[in-house]
Image: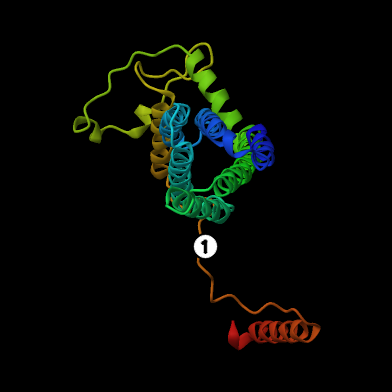
Amino acid sequence: MFAGAAWLAIAWAVMRLEPADIAAVAGPMLLFGAVCELLRTLAGTRTWWLNAGLTVIFAATGAAMLVPDESSFTTAAALTGWYLMVRGAVDVAVGIMTRGSDRVWSLIVTIGVLETGLGYFSAGPFARSADLIVVTLGALAVLRAVADLVTSLRLREIAHTTRKDVLELPPERSAGLVGYSAGRADFEATPVRARHRAPEGASTKLKRAQDLPSVSPEGGVGHIPGDTYHEHVVRTTADLDAMLVQAGITGPRAGAKQPEQTDMPPVPDTPEIAADAESASAGRSSRDDQPGNR
């Protein structure tokens, strides 16, 4: 954000330059652009490696512009155009790459296209006057100000959203995390019980009840040496499922879809249907009470 504000100040100051000061100002501007790329590298974005490479390239370009040269206008215009074309191409590429996750990607792409076009114009034979170079430097500063301000606001928004998601878990995930932490603490606190586990082929004839974890004298559930908590939970759950099958409990699990019953009698939801049902029931009872029907 401070970089964006600095670019705006530079844009205003550059427009008041004299022709003799262009060569002395263009170099520091590109060096400041290298510093901004370094800040983007330290921000920890996915393209930090690209910003690190741009830092080196723009620092070398700015240093080359500080070397005294007789054709000051030509060198300043050419190297400024180089900076704009590279920076614009990177903005277009990054904007298109993040179009699925960043809602301001179209703005970044637009800025990149303007930078690339401005750099192409500055590096050509048309930007040979001092006025055109001054306008190019001012436009460069304005475009970079908008890009840096948008990037800073997006980084702030993403950081706030990520921090909120990490610190504020949903209720079901919070309860699960508490239960998992408590179970792991109990697992690590209980003593390890020594037990030889038979090979898979020989254990098929044994009952699954023998594989249930034993209870230690301290009241905890002992576990096999070398087991992790995850392996202990998976094995215990499988053993309990096998015990339920042996006990004859083979019903559907909780949450399973129940089949619809189609042979259920109609529900007497009106007084007329209820009266008809009662009369029909009374008629069947009177017929059953007759001697011939017993």
Identified at 35% across, 28% down, the residue is 211
Between 268 and 229, the residue placed more toward the observer is 229
Name the side, left or right, on which 226 lies relative to 81. Answer: left
The residue pinned by badge 1 equals 258
In this view, which residue lies farthest toward the right?
271
In this picture, is 150 found above or below 106? above
Name the side, left or right, on which 15 lies relative to 79. Answer: right
Q: Is residue 65 visible?
A: yes
Between 271 and 220, the residue placed more toward the observer is 220
Identified at 43% across, 31% down, the residue is 69
Q: x, y percentage for residue 197?
A: 27, 23
In which quadrant of the rendered view does residue 60 lie?
top left
In which quadrant of the rendered view does residue 153 lie?
top right
Q: Is residue 249 visible?
A: no
Identified at 62% across, 36% down, the residue is 159
In this view, which residue lies farthest toward the left?
201
Asked which colour scheme the image uses, the reply is rainbow
Q: x, y percentage for residue 239?
A: 39, 34
Mark 1 residue type: Gln
> Split into 4 quadrants, where in the image is the N terminus?
top right
Between 54 and 284, the residue placed more toward the observer is 54
> Split into 4 quadrants, where in the image is the C terminus?
bottom right
Q: x, y percentage for residue 40?
A: 53, 33
SS class, disc 1: loop
